[in-house]
């Protein structure tokens, strides 16, 4: 699923950065942007599932709730720190054009780190699997429900913009920006993944994987149609209703799609081509943070491999294929070098020594 999220992210970024002229007015780019509504939810949803797996393992090893909370919150802090470091890199490489305010922009790594810290706190308060599952589901729904007013009628305007941006993504603008990643609504996907993860790692689900995956698929279809039904109601709860950006109904629809992707991923790995040899998507998923970090500069940054806003659909597609291939190769190289830092450093020293002696 992480590999699929990477692929969807690549296509969204590549077409958005490179397509120019009349290509930007076609249905093609609109479909690409629609696909771009999934990578963020997928990464956060999977962060929640991974979080459930980690906490479950720690419990089985006898770790106390305090130890589990400390470990997971610390890991969330590390991811958040990497998000800040990423912004520093992009600011430095974007000189002399990048404004200093870009340093405080709320990106996907920031919200993943914050979500992990919040999930650590939630798991500390709810100590059993059943309680954790209920609390995670309620927090996911609660975050989705309060998002519309926090973006409109309940905006915390009294906060400095760089703090309010973590609530609704306002950044330096006069209204919240849908392309940023504030806590509301994005953390809701992490808590949804956490609830699903706790269900996935039950004893029954472990013994009945196909049935569990099928049930999640059925739940996904039900959530999607529930979203459509709620959206069609003549009465709305909110003074300002924006289905595509803040609506809880759109949140339900995307969670439904995520559950269907979960079912599809299980089928792919259990009975499909995931069982046949090398899988580029699986490989990408093993290094999702690395390929996210690197590809941005070659798509949006000063090292973009194609001229931005100037390409036809075929040329942008070729660029996408190059980026995809390069990122798969990068993940393979990282896999080969993992744990061999001391060996590589020793080789470099041996190579440098003769030149120094000469």
Image (spheres, rainbow, N blue to C red):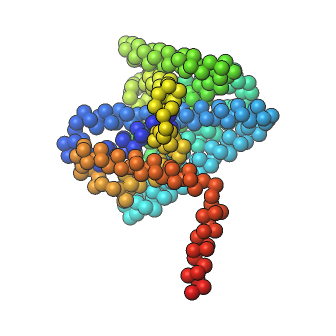
Which residue is located at x 54 percent, y 55 percent? 85
180 vs 209: above or below = below
Q: Which residue is more in the foreground, 234 or 28?
A: 28
Residue 66 location (% of width, % of height) = 77, 37
Residue beneath the point at 76% across and 31% down = 60
Q: Residue at x 74, y 35 (%)?
A: 58
Q: Residue furthest front?
A: 277
Q: Is residue 90 visible?
A: yes
Residue 168 showing in the rendered view: no
Instruction: Using residue 38 as the reference point, say whether residue 67 is left or right of it.
Output: right
Residue 161: x and y in percent read: 48, 46
Q: Which quadrant does the C terminus fall into? A: bottom right
Image-based side of 219 in relation to 200, left or right: left
- Is 102 placed above or below 50 here? below
Residue that lies at the very extreme toward the left in this rendered image: 22
The front one of 215 and 159 is: 215
Q: Is residue 118 above or below residue 95?
A: above
Where residue 153 appears, as percent x and y from the top left, is 45, 30
Q: Please, which residue is most extreme toward the bottom here?
A: 358
Q: Quadrant of residue 234?
A: top left
Nearer to me, 188 or 212 = 212
Residue at point 45%, 47% (across, down):
328
């Amino acid at each position: 699923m992480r590999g699929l999220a990477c692929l969807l992210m690549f296509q969204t970024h590549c077409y958005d950065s490179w397509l120019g002229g009349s290509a930007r007015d076609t249905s093609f780019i609109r479909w690409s942007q629609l696909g771009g509504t999934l990578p963020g939810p997928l990464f956060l949803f999977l962060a929640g599932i991974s979080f459930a797996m980690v906490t479950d393992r720690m419990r089985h090893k006898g770790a106390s709730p305090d130890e589990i909370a400390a470990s997971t919150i610390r890991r969330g802090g590390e991811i958040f720190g990497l998000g800040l470091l990423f912004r520093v890199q992009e600011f430095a490489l974007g000189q002399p054009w990048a404004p200093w305010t870009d340093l405080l922009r709320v990106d996907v790594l920031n919200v993943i780190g914050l979500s992990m810290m919040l999930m650590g706190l939630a798991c500390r308060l709810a100590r059993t699997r059943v309680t954790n599952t209920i609390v995670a589901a309620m927090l996911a729904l609660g975050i989705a429900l309060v998002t519309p007013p926090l973006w409109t009628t309940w905006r915390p305007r009294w906060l400095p913009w760089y703090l309010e941006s973590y609530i609704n993504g306002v950044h330096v603008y006069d209204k919240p920006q849908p392309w940023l990643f504030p806590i509301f609504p994005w953390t809701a996907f992490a808590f949804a993944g956490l609830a699903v993860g706790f269900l996935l790692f039950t004893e029954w689900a472990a013994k009945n994987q196909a049935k569990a995956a099928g049930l999640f698929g059925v739940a996904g279809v039900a959530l999607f149609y529930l979203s459509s039904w709620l959206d069609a109601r003549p009465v709305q709860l909110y003074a300002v209703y924006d289905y595509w950006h803040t609506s809880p109904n759109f949140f339900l629809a995307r969670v439904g799609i995520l559950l269907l992707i979960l079912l599809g991923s299980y089928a792919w790995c259990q009975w499909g081509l995931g069982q046949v040899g090398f899988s580029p998507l699986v490989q990408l998923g093993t290094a999702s943070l690395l390929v996210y970090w690197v590809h941005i500069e070659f798509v949006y940054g000063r090292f973009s491999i194609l001229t931005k806003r100037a390409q036809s659909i075929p040329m942008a597609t070729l660029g996408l294929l190059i980026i995809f291939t390069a990122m798969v190769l990068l993940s393979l190289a990282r896999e080969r070098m993992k744990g061999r830092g001391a060996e590589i450093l020793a080789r470099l020293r041996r190579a440098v020594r003769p030149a120094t002696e000469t």
